[in-house]
Amino acid sequence: MWFAFFLLMALGASVLLNLVLATATLGGGGGKVREVVLKDNQSENKIAMIEIGGIITSSGGQGSGKSMVDYIELMLERAAQDASVKAVLLKVDSPGGEALASDDIYRLIKDFQKEQSKPVVAVMMGLAASGGYYVSAPCRWIVANEMTETGSIGVIMRTYNYRGLMDKLGVEPLTFKSGDMKDMLSSTKPMSEITKEERAIVQASLDEVFVRFKAAVQEGRTFAEEMNGDDANSLAEDWEDYADGRLLSGKKAHGLGFVDELGNRDTAEKRALKLAGISDANLVVYHRPAKLGGIVGLLGESEEKTVKIDVGLDFPKLRVGQLYFLPAILGY
């Protein structure tokens, strides 16, 4: 009984401590993030680490109303406002995600470096493919491990057609439309009715986004080459031959000029110090704060809750007809 009492007290204290930490926030632009020191080197300088993990999406998460893109923007704003932050470390461990969300983050990083005299160094972890590479491309310096899976430069769209199954069940859709193309990508349209013109329109859309992807790579690596001078690792002349959706090891990507240096997070930190022209810095990270209302609501409601368990896998919830920067293995 006493053990249960003390266990309950410890749990309550833990919840209160987390709530206190969650309210100790820094912010701007209508949102807040909490700064946590990962490495205290007793320095007046800081390197701010921003993490991009899992599927890149523009959807709001966990009832906050803010998306991954919103939080990346907020974190970059904090890094810009804090004069002690001399560089940003972008930690990427992502298979990619939505084309638009990836491009939004790309532009945020590009504009940050243009407006601030603070370099952004990307460090690729186990996976930084497709959209994961897209968001790394604008960084002044890119570090990858030899065994990092990166590349997968390409665009993918998926949809399903259920008409065959519906016919077997005796279900026939009734469609009214204002134009011939209004039911493009419909999951109930007979495959025999999908015209060459429709396929050409969809393919043209993918090709247009693919051109943008390659332009982003070229633009980002050119910027890095101009900024890094003799230390630059230029794109290989035949780099576009490898922009066909294939995955590349970090070692291969380095040989083709897609990354600047082979190493790990420590390598990236040292590079950030060098590019910022400082000898030491504390490493800080910005965390999204917990919402008090959400916690109170969870404790106060008695209806059944869904418990989500993180098993280390992040499966994409792809939406039909949307363009993605994802490896083919995750796109289908």
Image (cartoon, grey):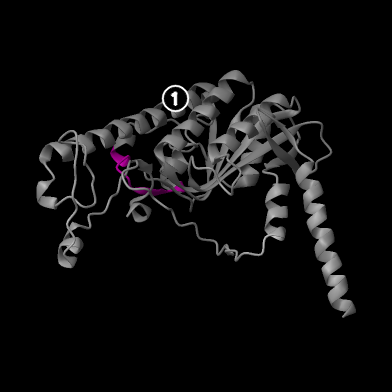
Q: Visible in this render: residue 264?
A: yes
Residue range of the region highlighted in magenta in the rendering = 241-250
Q: 206 or 64: nearer the eye?
A: 64
Direction from residue 111 to residue 16 in the image, left or right? right
The furthest residue to the bottom: 1
Residue 298 position within the rendered picture, expressed as x and y whole percent measured from the top left: 68, 58
Q: 2 or 74: nearer the eye?
A: 2
Instruction: Please tell me whether residue 248 belongs to the stretch shown in magenta.
Output: yes
Q: Visible in this render: residue 38?
A: no
At mark 1, the secondary structure is: helix
The furthest residue to the top: 115
Name the quarter where the C terminus is drawn: bottom left
Q: 244 or 25: nearer the eye?
A: 25
Rendered view: 35 above or below 298: above
How many numbered circles does the render carry? 1
Name the quarter where the N terminus is drawn: bottom right
Q: Residues within 10 Å of mark 1 (few under 14, many from 20)?
A: some
Residue 121 position within the rendered picture, expressed as x and y whole percent measured from the top left: 58, 35
Residue in the image at 73% along x and 54% along y: 296
Please name the residue that numbered disc 1 is placed on. Answer: 222
Residue in the image at 65% along x and 45% along y: 266
Residue 208 position within the rendered picture, expressed as x and y whole percent measured from the top left: 28, 31
Q: For the residue marked with disc 1, what is the amino acid?
A: Thr
Q: 90 or 162: nearer the eye?
A: 162
Residue 17 position within the rendered picture, expressed as x and y whole percent measured from the top left: 82, 53
Instruction: Please tell me whether residue 50 belongs to the stretch shown in magenta.
Output: no
